[in-house]
Image (spheres, grey):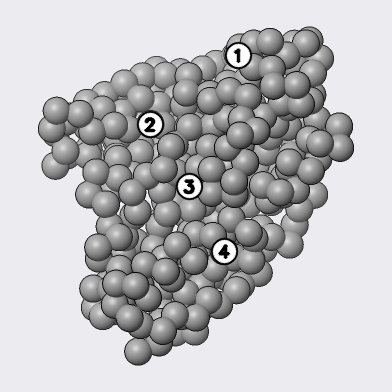
Amino acid sequence: MKVRIGTRKSKLALWQANFVKNFLEKKWGVEVELVKITTTGDKILDSPLAKIGGKGLFVKEIEQALLEGRIDLAVHSLKDVPMIIPEGLTLGAITEREDPFDVLISKEGKKLRELPPSSKVGTSSLRRQVQIKRLRNDLRVEVLRGNVDTRMRKLREGLYDAIILAYAGVKRMGYEREVSEVLDYFIPAVGQGSLAIEIREDDKKIRELIGPLDHFESRVRAECERAFLRRLEGGCQVPIGAYAEVRDGKVLIKGFISDLEGTKFIEGKEEGSIEEAEVVGERLAENLLARGGKEILEEIYGGRS
C-alpha cells in the first residue's frame, strides 16, 4: 500500500510531514510519498496575512488535492487550519502538543522587558503585536513574514532587534539555543504546537493508519480552543488568543479578544468537564462577547468592509 501525504514545501512543513511519514513507515510498513504543494500563502510573502485572507491560505490548495483524491492525507500546523473544515474532510488526528508558547529571539539575548526603547520587533501576528504593545508600547512592532530560516536570517542581518516565533517551530528547526525568552505569559494562538492530520471523512483505512497519532488530551484542548475561536468568528484580522489545559479531569481555558491597538483588551477564563470541552470554549467566547468583544468585532470588520 502507498500513502500520499500532502504538505507545503517549507522546511518546517516538511519536518512535520516527515514526522508522520516516519511513523507510518515504522508502525505499518507502508510506502509513503510526500506530495509538495505550493499554497497561496506561500506565494504572497510581502503582505500581512490579515490583509490577504488569513491562515486558511496555507491549507486551501492542499485540501483541494485531498478532496480530488490526489493525496490521501494532509499534515498541517493546527493553528493554520480554519475553524470550518470543508465538507467531506475531517481532522483524523491531532498529535501530542509540543510547547504551545511563543518565544523571543533577540540579537543580544535580551528579554522583552530588557529591550531598549524603539527596538524593532518583528512578527506577522496581530495576537502577538497587541500583547507586546500592552507590555512595551515604546517598541516598534513591524511585520515579519517568511519561514523560520528566513526570519532568523533577517534578525542576523540587523533588520530587526528581536523577533517572536512559535516555540514548537523553533524546536523543530533546531534553533532552541537561540531563544532569549519563553513568553509563557503571552496567550498563544489556538492550537499552537499540535499538528493536524486531515483526511477524507469516508476513508476508513487512512483513519485507521493515523489513529495512534491522535492524542486524546491534545484533541480535547484543541477542540476547546477551536470552539472558542469559531464562536468569535475570528480570523487573522482580529487579535485573539486562547490556551486550554486539562487538569484533574477538567478542561480550563483562558482567552482574549482585543482591538488592533491593544487598548480594548478583554480576557477571561472558564472551566468545565472534558466531555464538554467545546461548550466550555463557547461559553468563554460568549462571556467575552458580552463584555465588549462584540463591539471590537463590529469595529474591525465594519471598518474593513
Label 2 residue SS: strand
Relative to residue 263, is residue 67 drawn left or right? left
Q: Name the residue that disc number 1 marks.
A: 134
Counting labels gives: 4
Cα distance in 3D space between marks 2 and 1: 19 Å
Q: Quadrant of the N terminus?
A: bottom left
Say which amino acid is labelled 4: Leu
Cα distance in 3D space between marks 2 and 4: 26 Å
Q: Name the residue that disc number 3 marks.
A: 79
Q: Quadrant of the C terminus?
A: top right
Q: Residue at x 29, y 72 (%)?
A: 27
Determine which quarter of the picture holds residue 237.
top right
Nearer to the camera, 122 or 156 = 156
Say which amino acid is labelled 1: Arg
Mark before the other along the chain sequence, 4 or 1:
4
Mark before the other along the chain sequence, 2 or 1:
1
Say which amino acid is labelled 2: Tyr
Q: Name the residue that disc number 2 marks.
A: 243
Mark before the other along the chain sequence, 3 or 1:
3
Report crowding for label 3: few under 14, some 14 to 19, many 20 or more residues within 10 A (C-alpha): many
Mark before the other along the chain sequence, 3 or 4:
4
Label 3 residue SS: helix
